[in-house]
Amino acid sequence: MVPAKPNGKTIGILTGGGDVPGLNPAIRAVTVRALREGYRVVGIRRGWSGLIEIDRDKGEAGDSVVELTEEVVNKVGRTGGTFLHTSRTRPSHVPRADVPEHLQAAFQDEVNDLTPEVLKNLDFLGIDTLIPIGG
């Protein structure tokens, strides 16, 4: 992980739901403003699914998180869709078949609420504020 910015706060951004043209410009606008205000900004890949896939026991986020800089978001800010990718995952309603392997022993219901895992992963990543875009 990259050290926090001077104000010590980190913002996470994810996109959820369907892919629409305005997602990358929205990611860019939030990122640029937050960076200029002194925040560290990270993108969560694959939406809510990316947040539940993180295996804290491995001590890293794997490919679920990307550091967002002005350089990164300026490259995609005028393109449609979302470079972070998206999913239609609802953390509070995850079917057993979609529960990540590392969580399968703990979540065996037909439909599982993985919200506690999302909160633990946000803490693990040092994210103070989460901005979900889309729906």
Image (spheres, rainbow, N blue to C red):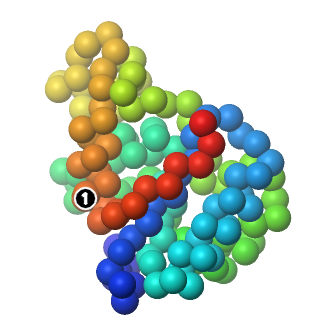
Q: Name the residue under label 1.
A: 124
Q: Is residue 32 left or right of residue 64?
A: right
User: Does the rendering let one see residue 37?
Assistant: yes
- Examine the image and state in which quarter residue 112 appears: top left
Give the residue at x 45% y 38%: 49
Quadrant of the rendering where the C terminus is positioned: top right
Give the residue at x 39% y 23%: 94
SS of the residue at dot 1? helix
**Image coords of residue 66 (percent x, y):** 49, 64
Give the residue at x 51% y 83%: 37
**Image coords of residue 74 (percent x, y):** 72, 74
Who is closer to the viewer here, 1 or 8?
Answer: 8
Q: Is residue 56 left or right of residue 68?
A: left
**Image coords of residue 110 (percent x, y):** 32, 10
- Examine the image and state in which quarter residue 6 appears: bottom left
Give the residue at x 45% y 61%: 12
* In this view, 119 is above or below 26: above
* In this view, 39 is above or below 125: below
| Tag 1: amino acid | Phe
Q: In this view, does 30 lie to the left or right of 125?
A: right
**Image coords of residue 38 (percent x, y):** 46, 84
* In this view, 99 is above or below 75: above
User: Does the rendering let one see residue 97?
Assistant: no
- Examine the image and state in which quarter residue 75 appears: bottom right
Within 10 Å of disc 1 (Cα), the crowding (few <14, some 14-19, many 20+) is: some
